[in-house]
Image (cartoon, grey):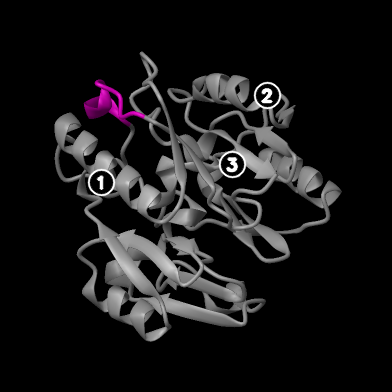
Amino acid sequence: MPGTFDRTRGRALTREVSPEYADAVSNYFTTRAPDYEAARGAQDAYFAALRAHGSEVVVLPPLEGYPDCSFTEDTAVILDDCVVIPNLGHPSRDGEQDSIAEFLADDFEIHRMPAGATLDGGDVVFYDDRFLVGVSTRTNREGASFLSKRAREVGLDVQLFDVPESTLHLTTVCSSPRAGTMVAAEGHLKEEDLAFAEEVIWIPEEEGYAANTIAYGDRIIMADGYKKSRQLMMDAGFSITTIDMTEFREVDASLTCLSVFIG
């Protein structure tokens, strides 16, 4: 079954923003307390953009006691007809993945991580013939190794990255919108890190948040307010839909955080 595994976007598994959203974990971009109502409005716009690009949006209800529960990307990694369900890297979030695993169990073979291994799906980027997996404050080497073994079982290579302290997740600073192409933020990743890519679109460091994109062929969704990055993507042949991600940026979340694409 396709999904994150091969860039198809037929169905997006999402979850409504929690009423406890003001207590979501944040370390990097925070300037103020996030606003629940504004986040709900932004999420509605996000859902509308996914639907306009052809995705069916499955919306689960919020989980009580989990302010970060709308960031479903972290809770599952699709590998063809199986799915890796990780132990999430922040203690306050571990448990969000259980209802996701229950939802996916009818369609996928479930692989749960052993105790001690941690991984957030936000540290996983699909590129053509491989997964790029970041070792970060949320994903440890045991978690990366577990995912790597499962990925190789379905015929994909894995390349590990040490995620710099300047960012939370690997997906925060890069994405792969089409075959052969990486979009990456300057100041976080180096040219040699992405030497495998046929094309790298470098986003200026001050607009690095815009390196996280959701692609539908040459049509992409990206965060609003990043003029240089928008022009770079247009010059590369993409048509663009932008979404105001201000309320999600306040809790270190990006566009891809809000979905697991499952088919």
Mark 2 nearby-residue class (10 Å; few <14, some 14–19, many ≥20)? few
Q: Which residues are magenta?
A: 16-24
Of the two numbered discs 3 and 1 on the same chain, state the one appearing first in sequence. Answer: 1
Who's the residue at 25% across and 46% down the image? 45
Q: Amino acid at mark 2?
A: Ala
Mark 3 nearby-residue class (10 Å; few <14, some 14–19, many ≥20)? many
Residue 104's spot in the image, x, y percent?
62, 28
Label 3 – label 1 distance at C-alpha: 20 Å
In this rendering, does residue 136 appear at all?
Answer: no
In the rendered image, the quadrant that contains the N terminus is top right
Residue 206's spot in the image, x, y percent?
27, 70
Of the two numbered discs 2 and 3 on the same chain, state the one appearing first in sequence. Answer: 2
Question: What residue did someone put label 1 on?
Answer: 45
Classify mark 3: helix, strand or loop: loop
Left or right of residue 205: residue 193: right
Q: Where, by quadrant of the figure, is residue 155 drawn?
A: bottom right
Who's the residue at 26% across and 27% down the image? 21
Query: Is disc 3 in contact with disc 1, using a CB cutoff of under 8 Å?
Result: no
Q: Amino acid at mark 1?
A: Ala
Q: Amino acid at mark 3?
A: Ile
In this rendering, does residue 130 appear at all?
Answer: yes
Q: Nearer the viewer, residue 25 or 52?
A: 52
Of the two numbered discs 1 and 2 on the same chain, state the one appearing first in sequence. Answer: 1
Disc assigned to residue 16: none
Disc assigned to residue 262: 3
Left or right of residue 42: residue 260: right
Classify mark 2: helix, strand or loop: loop
Mark 1 nearby-residue class (10 Å; few <14, some 14–19, many ≥20)? some
Magenta span dominant secondary structure = loop
